[in-house]
Amino acid sequence: MSTGENDLKSACFELARTTKWSRKPIDAELLSSLAVKFEEIARGFVEESLDRDIPLIVKAVRYLNQVHALPPMDEDTSWFYNMLSVVVEIARPNTVVDERGKPFLEEMQKGIHRSLSFQA
């Protein structure tokens, strides 16, 4: 297994841990099963011809885990598919945006710039 594939597996496991977090013990099998579901979804977004490789998807999964994953999501994976679709499209566009959509891209660009300037 390559480093990128290990990174993807690890990022998906961390995401599963975040979405299933609670104050009580979590069944390791359920956690692993959810991580596999996330990984399968994530692998579906790999498309070399669009420069959507595993390292990009790993970054997207880590971003979603940090910013959008919440414990109430539990076993639901639809949010992950939908959000991953959006962030990957922003990072590696597959469609042309016309003049009606470009103003929002500019707003996202401002927000991204602001986020990059914050110190963790």
Image (tube, grey):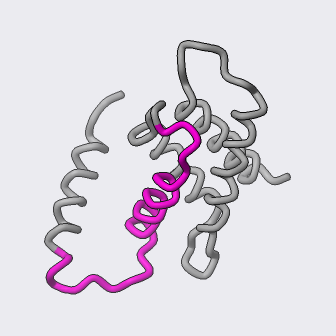
Left of 79 or right of it: where is 53?
Answer: right
The magenta region covers: 73-102
Left of 43 or right of it: where is 94?
Answer: left
Left of 106 or right of it: where is 16?
Answer: right
Residue at figure coordinates x 61%, y 37% from the top left:
16
Image coords of residue 56 (percent x, y): 56, 59
**Residue 29 appears in which quarter of the rendering?**
top right
- Vertical placement of residue 63 versus 48, above or below: above
Image coords of residue 109 (percent x, y): 24, 60
- Vertical placement of residue 34 versus 21, above or below: below
- Vertical placement of residue 35 versus 24, above or below: below
- Vertical placement of residue 16 versus 38, above or below: above
Left of 115 or right of it: where is 2?
Answer: right
Return the residue nearer the eye: 31 or 4: 31
Split into 4 quadrants, where in the image is the C terminus? Answer: top left
Residue at figure coordinates x 63%, y 59% from the top left:
41
Image coords of residue 52 (percent x, y): 57, 69
**Residue 82 appears in which quarter of the rendering?**
bottom left
Return the residue nearer the eye: 116 or 17: 17
Residue at figure coordinates x 40%, y 64% from the top left:
86
Residue at figure coordinates x 62%, y 42% from the top left:
11
Q: How many marks?
A: 0
Q: Is residue 98 magenta?
A: yes
Q: Residue furthest right?
A: 1
Q: Is residue 28 magenta?
A: no
Image coords of residue 87 (percent x, y): 42, 60
